[in-house]
Amino acid sequence: MNLIRLHSEPFSRDGNIAADGAARLLGQPALSPLELVIRETIQNSWDASLQTERTPRYSIRIRHLESSQIDAMRSFFQELPPQLANEPIAGLIRQFLASSGLVMEICDANTQGLDGPTSASRSLQEGESANFVNFIRNIGSARDMSQGGGTYGFGKSSLFKISRCQTIIVHSAIDAGDGLEHRLIGKALGAAFDHGGRRFTGRHWWGALGDEDSGSVDPVLRSQAAELSAALGFQERNTHEQRGTSLMILDPDLEEFDPSGDFATSPPTEIRNHLGARLQDTILWHCWPKFTHRDDGSVPMECHLSILGDDYQLPDPSTIQPLWLMTQALASARAKEDPIHCQRPKMRLGFFGQSRASIELVADERFRRHLGETGLIPEKLHHVALLRPAELVVRYLEGSINEGEQLQWAGVFITDIGENAEVEKAFAMSEPPAHDDWQPKAAQALTPHQRTYVNVALNRIRERIRSLSGSDIRQGRLSGGEARSSLAALAGDIGRSLIGAGLGGADGNRPGRGGGGGGGRRASLRLGSPASEGTSLVNGQPVARFRIRLSGPADAAPSISFTPWVQMDEGTKDPFAPNGKAPQVIGVEIDSQPVPYGENGYVCTASSGGTDIQILVSIPDYVAVGITAEIVQGGEG
């Protein structure tokens, strides 16, 4: 009698989420399926290690199943969804069983494994874990764990996306008090289908027959699970140090590793080297903090790779140029020497670290020689890595090479935890399901204070990016004809809603420097409020045009400064757009003639009837920009 039974989930009277809907819960992240899998599984392994005292080990094995293991796999999938149901999973698994049996096994050790009850309907006892049901059964369960990396639990759908047959088998060994308890179960995410007058979600499990009333299956347990996992070729788990979880992804999509699709015609050694380079490059770029030594010499995690029989040891990030700049910046951020604060409400938001090096530094070619331009680690760094306390990279904010000082640079920002984890929760809740960004505008559950924390931190980080990039505002000149090149779509439909109209801040009327004091002719000069006149396209760059009226004696030639800014949703003015770039004044004109830039600002000649000054401001992103104008020095014509 076959031990393994199939359970295909039917829709309940009250409804369920369809499997294809569950697979779309990640949204449309910018990351590739491989990047999502790496980030999700390392995050899961880290979270599962927080209750243990040993360094967690993370490994990936890509291999072909042996003939006996293929036989065990055929026995495991003896029951499949009926062909008449038009559920594609059955045909995809049959194709896999008839192939060479390529699998990708992602493992961790020295972790607590998928413990807790195996039924999602059972209430938890005090202090009891829900790891098994949250990973195997539930969709979207929050991970309530201090210093953890995950929040939503949606990322596990990436495991099914990278499988050609959308199927995984999970083996976990947990602490049972008197030894290890083994658990083994298979799961697939297909698509909703109809069969026998019933509607099914497309979620499938393979395991031991469970409660007859539920019709579901439970994981195979204990010695039977250990024997079956060994037959399938899973990593051995016989000791307490081998506690943890293995995820066997069936028929992984190798085109993800090599978009050129040359594997079929490549020599085996080239295939192994390419796969090894791809995995190491991806793990390092997205998760290098987890493999960077602490001050005491320890590392948060260990990593080992086995690719088609060849073993690879993940290199120390501090030995790779220019990634070592990130490790230096991390050490500085870990030292908490440069805190970033919010003033209203008063709160410490996190810590910043930075490191710089010559742009002549030669980049490490060990991965790029195999990956070419598809490698993730840049040849030159001008990035800030955003981290939460778990030290998993959320995303990078990119600036530019400091051309003036001929420097490349790296920065790291680590969020603080805050009292009652208030700051940590704000950043965690601002992340989308893929955990690859901070999006305070889109996170409806954030309180106003929490949204402020994230916005202020991002603004302060962009200030650091501007400083590291050496991107002081550079003034330029444009002819009137160039400035008026039409950008019809932007100027016509969205120009005035996109670009701040009438936003000027200081209008030149403030006491002292603004034009209302200081004696002499300067007291009679006056600047009006900036008015928006739409947008145009200059050399492919969207540009906003503003007009300001200058009134005063005809013989006055004051110097005027123009400071551009970005209008934020919170009503604040920021020097940077969300992409980290600053708007710049690229030209000032009177009657289509360029105005010279003097030592203190633009020298503009006034006329008795008033003078219209046009200011051109580059738009660094799809944002509203404005300017502040100020008379900084008066003069005689």
Image: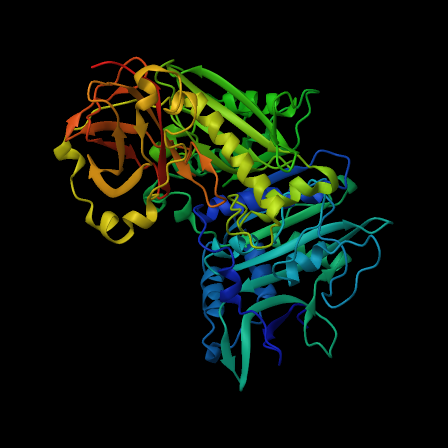
Give residue 427's quadrant in the image.
top right
* Residue 582 % position (x, y): 38, 31
Q: Nearer the viewer, residue 361 or 533?
A: 533
- Residue 238 drawn at (x, y percent): 75, 45
The correct choice, above or below, for 123 with respect to 13 in the image is above
Residue 185 occupies quadrant: bottom right
Residue drawn at 66 percent across, 34 percent down: 346
User: Is residue 195 placed above or below 295 in the rendered structure?
Assistant: below
x, y (%) of residue 184?
A: 68, 58
Nearest the eye: 359 or 567: 567
Q: Observer-nearest residue: 326 or 500?
A: 500
Extreme residue in the bottom direction? 197
The single residue placed furthest to the left in the displayed view is 481
In the rendered image of this protein, does residue 74 appear above or below residue 629?
Answer: below
Q: In which quarter of the image is the N terminus?
A: bottom right
Quadrant containing the C terminus is top left
Where is residue 412 shown, x and y percent of the image? 54, 28
77 and 13: which is toward the camera: 13
Q: Describe residue 91's horizontal placement relative to residue 115 as left or right.
A: left
Please give the name of the residue rendered at 52% of the width and 25% of the height, measured from the top-left corner: 326
Q: How is the image coloured?
A: rainbow
Residue pictured at 26% horizontal, 33% vertical: 549
**Left or right of 262: which side holds 224?**
right
Residue reaching furthest to the right: 178
Q: Is residue 377 left or right of residue 239?
A: left
601 vs 76, left or right, is left
Does residue 507 show up?
yes
Whether residue 322 is visible? no
How many numbered marks appear? 0
